[in-house]
Image (cartoon, helix red, strand yellow):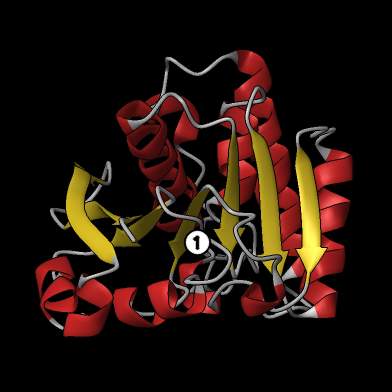
Amino acid sequence: MKDNKEQEAPVIFWRINEWFPDLSPAVKASLKTYHDELIKANRTLNLISPKTIFVGDAIHFADSILSSKTIFGSNSKIDQIYDFGSGNGFPGLVFAILYPQVKVVLVESDSKKCEFLKGMAATLKLSNVTVECKNVDALPDGSVRYAMARGFSSISKTILVARKSMPKGGIFYHIKGEEWGMEVSEIPTQLCSIWSPALAGEYKLPIGQVKFSIVKTEKIA
């Protein structure tokens, strides 16, 4: 008989199939494989906070699915997109799973995380993914037409870092919470003459009431 004081191990939830019935069986299988491998790798790599492991299906996967859908839904002309500071692969790897016709470039400076990203791309057979193991400011001038970031930095710092790699007309998609307006208001005047910010879309996770936003900044000069 079990000791009454003995506690059962916390449940690691996986509710993606329930929340996103429209996804194909192949996409669902790839997302589940990614989830399982992420948890294994997290034992030795600091990929996600231990506090988020049990609800990673919502905080990481559902968020990346919804943000990716919002980004691509706002601009179906995207044929290649960079994920700055990809780290654990959110949202870049999820974007690549959802849209195999789009080339996704994961940019990460940490060599161990780069190896994880390369390994995941190989495991998931994502031929549309490449990994650039370098600092974002080391990307060639004018090489990035579209980019996105989740938790990389503030909007101001991100567009400052991206100023050389993005050409005129380039668009950066920033995945932000409800306080995005404050970040936009903090963009220095000199950057506002180069970048034009706008709200590309909003979404809510399947659990909770917090609203998330996709802010796009287009390079106008």
Amino acid type at circle 1 is: Phe
Q: Nearer the viewer, residue 176 or 207?
A: 176
Q: Nearer the viewer, residue 135 or 221?
A: 221
Residue visible at 70% across and 32% down in the picture: 30
Pointer 1 local density, CA inside 10 Å: few below 14, some 14–19, many at least 20 = some
Q: Mark 1 points at which residue?
A: 54
**Residue 6 appearing in the image:** no
Q: Which of 211 and 49 is in front in this view?
A: 211
Image x and y of residue 98, in percent: 57, 28
Image x and y of residue 110, in percent: 76, 80
Residue visible at 16% across and 82% down in the picture: 189
Residue visible at 71% across and 76% down in the picture: 138
Q: Nearer the viewer, residue 77 or 112?
A: 77
Q: In this view, does 177 lie above or below 124?
A: below
Q: Is residue 211 above or below residue 27?
A: below
Residue 197 placement: quadrant: bottom left
Residue 181 placement: quadrant: bottom left
**Residue 56 appearing in the image:** yes
Residue visible at 41% across and 32% down in the picture: 72
Is 179 on the left or on the right of 53, as rendered? Answer: left
